[in-house]
Image: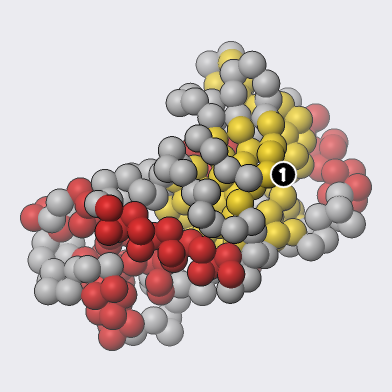
Amino acid sequence: MSASKNEMGRAQIESENDHVNSDALIAGVELFCERDDRILFDGLNLSLKAGELVQLAGPNGAGKTTLLRILAGLNRDFEGQVLWQGKDLHRHYEQSARDRLYLGHLSAVKKALTPIENLRWFLSPWSNITDDDIFNALAEVKLAGYEDVICQQLSAGQHRRVALARLLLTPSKLWILDEPFTALDVEGVAWLETLIAKKVEDGGAVLITSHHALSDIAGLRRIELGYSHPYREENGSGS
């Protein structure tokens, strides 16, 4: 990456996009990223407002997870800029970190801990969340009675439910979800669809990668990444 190019354009990009992105929770501006001498995306602009659901689509290896991690502030190997409510995300990362909840395609559950211990660890930045809150969330994700079972003894689907319980417990404005339906059964898929729809209806925002069709959720926008084009955006859904 050309550091000089990135730094030279940073202030100009923020100034030029101040009005355009003033009502966006998060925005990517002129994003460029390559891996192993292959360009994943170039000149990509996207924004996500409160009350919106955006699905990233495209073939494996097109850069969907990379883009999610860039927008979550977890990957800095790119050119361009990420804005959080109009301000450079990395310059204001600590102040805004709790407003974004990132769930990766792996459940990131520590197998040596129980579900309640995992959630206590996950949720340590939110000091107002009690054990009663955690127990209630675990009950909603169908893990009542498993609160004190070592996660080593739980299935992959139950690991996913432990991770998804975080969605019930944090007040984050934006959910960034990478293949969240993985390992869920039919009941779990329906529950998560309803939860995502409610988040959007209540004025939150969701950015998601998933091979699962989300056509029943109102307001869906799709951004497609691919090898033959840097990106394509369309309204509506599809797979």
Does residue 116 lie above or below 58 as drawn?
A: below
Does 131 sit left or right of 75 as displayed? left
Q: Position of residue 88 (x, y in %)?
A: 74, 53
What residue appears at the point 72 percent right and 50 percent down from the top-left corner? Answer: 47
The answer, for residue 162, to whether it is visible in the render is yes
What residue appears at the point 78 percent right and 58 percent down from the top-left corner? Answer: 86
Does 132 sit left or right of 22 as displayed? left
Counting every numbered tag in the picture gives: 1
Which one is in front, 226 or 3?
A: 226
Question: In which quadrant of the rendered image does the N terminus lie?
Answer: top right
Please rate how many residues cluster around mark 1, counting C-alpha atoms within 10 Å: few if below 14, some from 14 to 19, many from 20.
Answer: some
The quarter holding residue 116 reads bottom left
Q: Position of residue 217 (x, y in %)?
A: 54, 57
SS for dot 1: strand
Q: Position of residue 225 (x, y in %)?
A: 60, 29
How did the renderer colour the structure? secondary structure
What residue appears at the point 70 percent right and 59 percent down from the top-left corner? Answer: 49
Residue type at the position of mark 1: Leu
The answer, for residue 71, to whether it is visible in the render is no
Which one is in front, 140 or 219?
A: 219
Does 206 sit left or right of 141 as displayed? right
Does residue 141 lie above or below 56 as drawn?
A: below
Which one is in front, 150 or 137?
A: 137
Which one is in front, 156 or 121?
A: 156
The quarter holding residue 38 reads top right
Which residue matches tag 1?
46
What residue appears at the point 22 percent right and 68 percent down from the top-left corner? Answer: 142
View extreme (top): residue: 37
Does residue 215 lie above or below 37 as drawn?
A: below
The quarter holding residue 62 reads top right
